[in-house]
Amino acid sequence: MTVAPILPERSEWTVDDLGDLPKDLPYELVNGRLIVPSPTAVHQDLCVELLLALRVNCPTEYLVSIDLSMRIDRRNEPRPDVVAIRREHADRSPVPVEDALLAVEVLSPTSTFRDLYDKAKVYAHAGVRTYWVVDPLHERMTLTEYTLGPTGEYEVLTHTEDLFVTERPWKVSVDLPALTTRRAGLLARDEG
């Protein structure tokens, strides 16, 4: 039997406090709040599909990863669902945020506000040039592509539920209708 770890009680966490946590605990720190995510298999499957779409034309000097910690500042060490980074940091965790070209978050019922607002501000202020938010919570899956504007805040570049094609951070296409169908198939219950 595995016993759940007892976490120290703190109202505000910093990256210095993370050393007190069990090493195998998947956590992220957003605006001083400790988050211990517990994604579903459908969520993780979607992350893998996005990773595969990004890998197709990924230049050799970059790599795409899932669930990788990014060190931003004392109060923020998020774990984007998918991230594109420089290959030179393939063996580091957390990776420096300066080397992230793209952060992707896939919404879940418990992460919507955090992904759309808190993390968007954290990533924008850290200088992550492109941010995607994939919303699988409705009948048709959507992808919103944000890019840093002249004020240092994200601006919506694209919002679609169809075939998404972009040149940021390199040429990528994501077939959202196919992903919607895949999700529906994974969630289908055999009746009979």
Image (cartoon, rainbow, N blue to C red):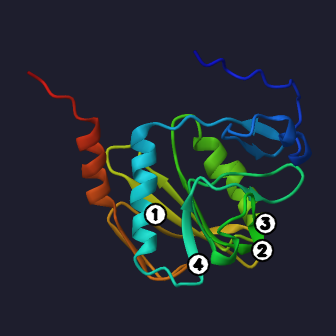
Q: Secondary structure at mark 4?
A: strand
Query: Mark 1 or mark 2, which is nearer the start of the sequence?
Result: 1
Of tags 2 and 1, which is closer to the observer?
1
**Circle 3 crowding by C-alpha within 10 Å: few under 14, some 14–19, many from 20:** some
In the image, residue 97 lies at what x, y percent?
75, 66
Query: Mark 2 or mark 4, which is nearer the start of the sequence?
Result: 4
Q: Tell which of 107 and 140 is nearer to you.
A: 107
In the image, residue 143 lies at what x, y percent?
45, 60
Query: Which of the labelled discs sits on residue 62, or is there none?
Result: 4
Q: Secondary structure at mark 3?
A: helix
What is the C-alpha distance between the residues marked 4 and 3?
19 Å
Query: Mark 2 or mark 3, which is nearer the start of the sequence?
Result: 3
Which residue is label 3 attached to?
126
What is the C-alpha distance between the residues marked 4 and 1?
13 Å
Q: Secondary structure at mark 2?
A: loop
Which residue is label 1 attached to?
51
Viewport quadrant of the N terminus: top right
